[in-house]
């Protein structure tokens, strides 16, 4: 009998064709700050305001590293094999029987298929685990590129979660979000 209440822990490194997904380090903070965390265009549909100072990004790196000692949230930085630059980050959130995720791409690397590659790898890992049967994520109804990533990764739109999540760079009123999933 499989332990269906067990949380699965993802590996610290996942390799794809063009990317290394790896645990963050404190010395990643300046690049993360410059490439996406400080940028209004990137954070528009996210749940947090752009960082004003690199110390905020250092705190994010610290939280991300510490979370790896827990059993629920595992954030990866996506390093481009060819040049060592960061393409973004993806966080895997584990629950018994299912996994969700969230992601942010480095603005200068948008449109090169990197996030789709990372999501596909995350889904492949999840479905190699016997206890995980569903992978899902949500996105603001206006976030067309994010919807496209999930569609390219084979996920299906299940509908709209009304007034689901505050995206404070747009409004203080919770926003409608699409929910996408893929099942085994
Ligand atoms: C969503 C995001 C992570 C995608 O990253 P990416 O590495 O550019 O993703 P990909 O290159 O794999 O795919 C992006 C797709 O969106 C499409 N796209 C980009 N802008 C678009 C627009 N304005 N309208 C329609 N499609 C658009 C791209 O053309 C591409 O699709 P295609 O391969 O069919 O041409 C990136 O746009 C981002 O970081 N956005 C800001 C943060 C964010 O919103 N995160 C998600 C929160 S749910």
Image (cartoon, rainbow, N blue to C red):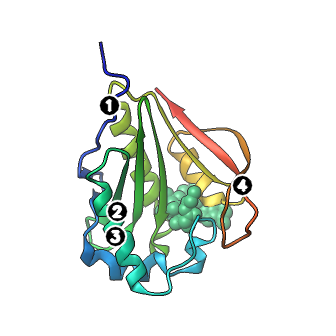
The CB of the residue at mark 4 lies under 8 Å from ligand 1:
no
What is the number of the mark on residue 94? Answer: none
Question: What separation in Å lies between label 3 and label 2 (alpha carbons)?
Answer: 5 Å
Q: Nearer the viewer, mark 3 or mark 1?
A: 3
Q: Which residue is the site of mark 3? A: 61
Q: Residue reaching furthest top?
A: 1
Query: Percent from the top left, x then y, of residue 161?
Result: 71, 44
Q: Is residue 168 left or right of residue 56?
A: right
Is label 1 in a helix, a strand or a loop? loop
Question: What separation in Å lies between label 4 and label 1 (alpha carbons)?
Answer: 30 Å
Q: Earlier in the sequence, mark 2 or mark 4?
A: 2
Rendered residue at 34%/83% (across/down): 30
**Rendering quadrant holding ligand 1:** bottom right
Circle 3 residues within 10 Å: few <14, some 14–19, many ≥20: many
Q: Which residue is the site of mark 4? A: 141
The answer to whether the residue labelled 3 contacts the one labelled 2, judged by CB atoms less than 8 Å apart, is yes
């Amino acid at each position: 009998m499989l332990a269906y209440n067990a949380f699965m822990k993802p590996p610290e490194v996942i390799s794809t064709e063009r990317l290394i997904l790896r645990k963050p380090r404190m010395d990643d903070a300046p690049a993360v700050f410059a490439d996406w965390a400080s940028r209004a265009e990137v954070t528009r549909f996210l749940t947090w305001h752009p960082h004003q100072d690199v110390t905020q990004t250092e705190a994010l790196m610290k939280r991300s590293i510490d979370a790896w000692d827990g059993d629920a949230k595992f954030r990866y930085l996506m390093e481009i094999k060819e040049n060592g630059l960061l393409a973004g980050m993806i966080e895997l959130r584990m629950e018994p029987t299912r996994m969700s995720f969230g992601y942010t791409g480095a603005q200068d690397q948008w449109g090169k298929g990197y996030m789709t590659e990372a999501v596909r790898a995350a889904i492949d890992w999840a479905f190699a685990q016997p206890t995980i049967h569903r992978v899902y994520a949500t996105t603001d109804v206006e976030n067309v590129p994010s919807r496209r990533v999930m569609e390219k990764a084979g996920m299906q739109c299940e509908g709209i979660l009304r007034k689901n999540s505050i995206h404070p760079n747009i409004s203080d009123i919770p926003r409608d979000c699409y929910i996408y999933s893929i099942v085994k």
